Amino acid sequence: MSLTEYSFQYDASRLELFHYTLSLSDPIIPGVIIVVILATLIAYRALPYLYGYLRVQEMDRDKAEKRRVIQDLILMKEIQGELEREMEQALLNMALQDRSQHA
């Protein structure tokens, strides 16, 4: 059967097979609908605050990481200064030893 040969036949008698009327005697479906609506409203109200909280946490982590990097750089600069002083001392000692040996 090709698509052009198919004819759709509408049967209105089958519409009555399923129907539901909201009633308080059977609160399952209205309860589910109310719970879904409340959950949606709570999510729309809470998600911006949750996003803000997570963003602040991320910014705090970034700030702590930058602070740690700066402390490491300061420590490296101090170590470099100490090494330069030790090298100057070693050069001065070598120069003094050469001078005392030649004198």
Image (cartoon, rainbow, N blue to C red):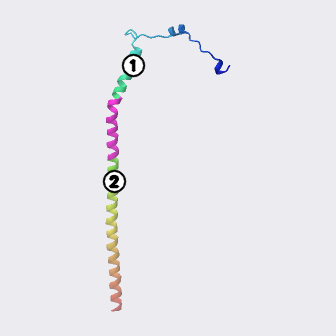
Q: On residue 66, which mark appears?
A: 2
Give how far across and how far down residue 31 sits, in percent. 38, 17
Give how far across and how far down residue 14 sits, in percent. 54, 9
- In the image, farthest residue toward the bottom: 103
Tell me the residue at 32%/39% (across/down). 53
Q: Quadrant of residue 49?
A: top left
Relative height, residue 6 to residue 46 (above, below): above
95, 47: nearer the viewer: 47
Q: Which image quadrant: the N terminus?
A: top right
Please report whichever mark, 1 or 2, sits nearer to the chain's N-terminal start.
1
Mark 1 and 2 residues: CB-CB less than 8 Å, in contact? no
| Badge 1 density bin: few <14, some 14–19, many ≥20, Cα 10 Å | few
The span shown in magenta is: 43-59
Q: Is residue 17 left or right of residue 102?
A: right
Distance Cα–Cα, label 1 vs label 2: 48 Å
| Badge 2 density bin: few <14, some 14–19, many ≥20, Cα 10 Å | few
Relative height, residue 14 to residue 58 (above, below): above
- Asked if the stretch drawn in magenta spans residue 26, the answer is no
Q: Nearer the viewer, mark 1 or mark 2?
A: 1
Which residue has dot 1 on it?
33
